[in-house]
Image: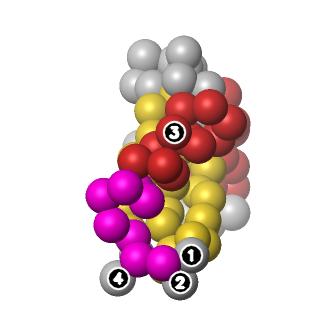
Amino acid sequence: MARVIVDVMLKPEILDAQGQAIARALPRLGFSGVSAVRQGKRFEVEIDGPADEAALAEVRKMAETLLANTVIEDYTVTAEA
């Protein structure tokens, strides 16, 4: 069994209102020195067998189809070591 990580983030040109709200809240909570925050999603997909190229291609297809809205989001797929 292998674990594959899919990280999904809004594309850089898309306004991240939630990230901006977090960035504004940090100083009120005593955190300084943060100039920007981008919020995203992380999916951990456990697959049967090794995380070979065929399995990673299948997870990429999952990301394209369901996990990410590719109009406004980018994603990366990586096998966990």
Mark on residue 81? 4
Single out the mark in the foreground, 3 or 4. 3
Which circle's residue, 4 or 2, is located before the other in the chain? Answer: 2
- Residue 7 in view, yes or no: no
Mark on residue 1? 2
Single out the mark in the foreground, 3 or 1. 1
Q: CA distance from mark 3 to mark 1?
A: 16 Å
Instruction: State the residue at coordinates (30%, 58%).
Output: 53
Numbered disc 2: secondary structure: loop
Mark on residue 61? 3
Instruction: State the residue at coordinates (54%, 32%).
Output: 64
State left or right for residue 73 relative to residue 54. Answer: right
Residue indicated by mark 1? 48
Single out the mark in the foreground, 4 or 2. 2
Which circle's residue, 3 or 1, is located before the other in the chain? Answer: 1
Q: Amino acid at mark 1?
A: Asp
Mark 4–mark 2 CB contact (< 8 Å)? no
Which circle's residue, 4 or 1, is located before the other in the chain? Answer: 1
Q: Amino acid at mark 2?
A: Met
- Residue 21 in view, yes or no: yes
Numbered disc 4: secondary structure: loop
Q: Position of residue 17 (x, y in %)?
A: 66, 28
